[in-house]
Amino acid sequence: MSPTRFAVDRMLGRLATWLRLIGQDATYGSQLCGRTLVRHARREGRTILTRDRRLLRDPHSPPVVFIAGDDFRVQLRQAVDHFHLDPFADVFTRCARCNKVLCGVAAAAVADCVPPYVLATQQRFARCPHCRRVYWSATHADRIRSELVALGFPPPPH
């Protein structure tokens, strides 16, 4: 069974970012709402995540899941539970900005893109092949993992 691919409506931007942080394929943009969202999801074989109840009544739409909560933590919990996702399995494998799968790169390849301290203290880097954003493990990664644990998701065994 292939993983679920999501089309996230424009009302759920923070959820889209968190889905990407946990490695889920989640398209999102200010233009993705209503009929545009439905066409996009149908064309790409995606499940719609929305706060728009009208999409639930469309018999021709692709699969739609209504996201009930206003808080991104409640929304993320709902999506993880509904789709039986493991939030730690693919954490930090996608670009949080544009959703592309990250590629590992050598430190020398990003030396001109990161602060000298980061270059001196980090061994592993990843880059988005689309937007060229560079990622490395730092305190933000620890905070994200802590947030996932605080939401009740069990961390993987070491």
Image: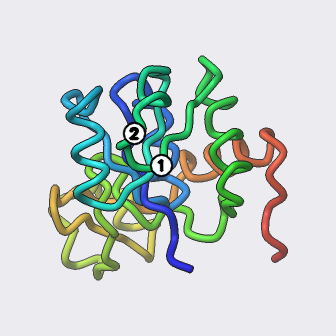
Residue that lies at the very extreme toward the front in this rendered image: 59
Mark 1 or mark 2, which is nearer the start of the sequence?
A: 2
Q: Secondary structure at mark 1?
A: loop
> In which quadrant will I find the N terminus?
bottom right
Give the class, few, some or many, for how many residues have Cα within 10 Å of label 1's Cα (few <14, many ≥20): some
**In this picture, residue 27 sits left or right of residue 143:** left
Q: Nearer the viewer, mark 2 or mark 1?
A: 1
Judge by depth and name the residue closer to the eye, 156 or 41. 41
- Dividing the picture into quadrants, the one containing residue 140 is top right
Locate residue 115, reporting x and y percent.
Answer: 29, 53
Residue that lies at the very extreme toward the top in this rendered image: 70
**Residue annotated with mark 1:** 63
Q: Is residue 158 above or below residue 72?
A: below
Label 2 is placed on what type of residue? Val
Locate residue 17, reporting x and y percent.
Answer: 43, 42
**Residue annotated with mark 2:** 8
Locate residue 60, reporting x and y percent.
Answer: 35, 43
Marker disc for residue 2? none
Label 1 is placed on what type of residue? Pro
Q: Is residue 53 above or below residue 144?
A: above
Q: Secondary structure at mark 2?
A: strand
Q: Residue at x 33, y 69 (%)?
A: 101
Q: Residue at x 33, y 27 (%)?
A: 10
Q: How is the image coloured?
A: rainbow
Q: Residue at x 31, y 49 (%)?
A: 41
Locate residue 107, reporting x and y percent.
Answer: 29, 76
